[in-house]
């Protein structure tokens, strides 16, 4: 299981540098437009400056309506993944093709109340499904119980699709909640790490919880 760290609520350069020192794979960038979700993130140029402190693989989570506009900016960060929401009213197939033509892996994110089977038409085309375990738009929320059955449903579909896509879970993840999402390929952790002072200790606790699930 790989770990992505969300820097949504981290502003100080020193803290960004400290987070980069942690031994995890992904930098998870939450991008919000003030329309698809209420909050609006900083302009691209400011986000770009923050990413300069990192040498991790970049995993972008677009919570926006105008997905293509954001892809045009964020592709320049050379992300491994760009994930957008199935709930946007854009042409999903076109966006998938656009990202693949740019050699960027495609993720499709799904909000807690959207039925899992709405993903079906796209599962043979995407590289990743991002299962939201909170409502998108805000860090520091509580992991939703409904995620337990939703990840089971998604794991079954993943088998039916010969493991052709990965599962990422995002929102409210801390050591206690990892047992419910042990089948995820990537987990996103935000406030559990970034709102504490000892980042390394928190990451160790997360890794311990992951190991406990294997036994
Ligand atoms: C929520 C974001 C998440 C979130 C993770 O809209 O997509 O990435 O910030 O932060 P925590 O772990 O605090 O829920
Ligand atoms: Zn996210």
Image (spheres, rainbow, N blue to C red):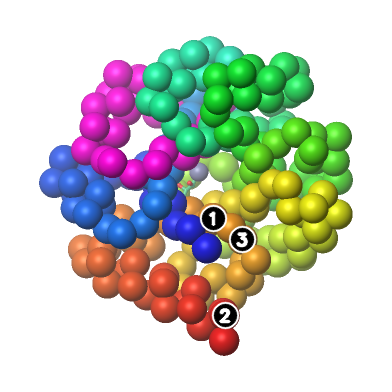
Q: Which residues are drawn in magenta? A: 40-67
Q: Nearer the viewer, residue 107 or 115?
A: 107
Q: Residue at x 55, y 25 (%)?
A: 103
Please report whichever mark, 2 or 1, sits nearer to the chain's N-terminal start. Answer: 1
Q: Earlier in the sequence, mark 3 or mark 2?
A: 3
Q: What SS does tag 2 mark? A: helix
Query: Looking at the picture, how far across and down is residue 3, in whole percent?
Result: 45, 57
Q: Residues within 10 Å of mark 3 (few under 14, many from 20)?
A: some
Q: Which residue is tagged 1?
A: 186
Q: Quadrant of residue 95?
A: top right
Residue bearing mark 3: 184
Q: Is residue 105 above or below residue 1?
A: above
Rendered view: 164 above or below 22:
above
How far across and how far down the image is residue 102, in percent? 55, 19
Going by the image, does 20 lie left or right of 3? left
On residue 214, which mark appears?
A: 2
């Amino acid at each position: 299981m790989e770990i992505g760290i969300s820097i949504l609520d981290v502003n100080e350069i020193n803290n960004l540098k400290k987070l980069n020192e942690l031994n995890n794979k992904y930098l998870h960038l939450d991008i919000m437009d003030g329309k698809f979700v209420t909050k609006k993130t900083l302009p691209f140029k400011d986000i770009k400056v923050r990413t300069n402190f990192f040498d991790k693989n970049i995993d972008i989570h677009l919570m926006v309506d105008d997905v293509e506009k954001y892809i045009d900016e964020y592709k320049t960060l050379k992300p491994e993944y760009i994930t957008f929401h199935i709930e946007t009213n854009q042409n999903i197939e076109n966006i998938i093709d656009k990202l693949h033509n740019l050699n960027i892996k495609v993720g499709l994110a799904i909000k807690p109340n959207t039925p899992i089977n709405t993903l079906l038409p796209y599962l043979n085309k995407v590289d990743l499904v991002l299962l939201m375990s909170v409502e998108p738009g805000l860090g520091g929320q509580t992991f939703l119980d409904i995620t337990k059955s939703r990840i089971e449903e998604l794991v079954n579909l993943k088998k039916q699709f010969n493991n052709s896509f990965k599962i990422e879970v995002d929102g409210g993840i801390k050591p206690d909640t990892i047992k419910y999402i042990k089948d995820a390929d990537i987990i996103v952790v935000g406030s559990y790490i970034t709102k504490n002072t000892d980042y390394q200790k928190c990451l160790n606790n997360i890794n311990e919880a992951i190991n406990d699930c294997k036994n």
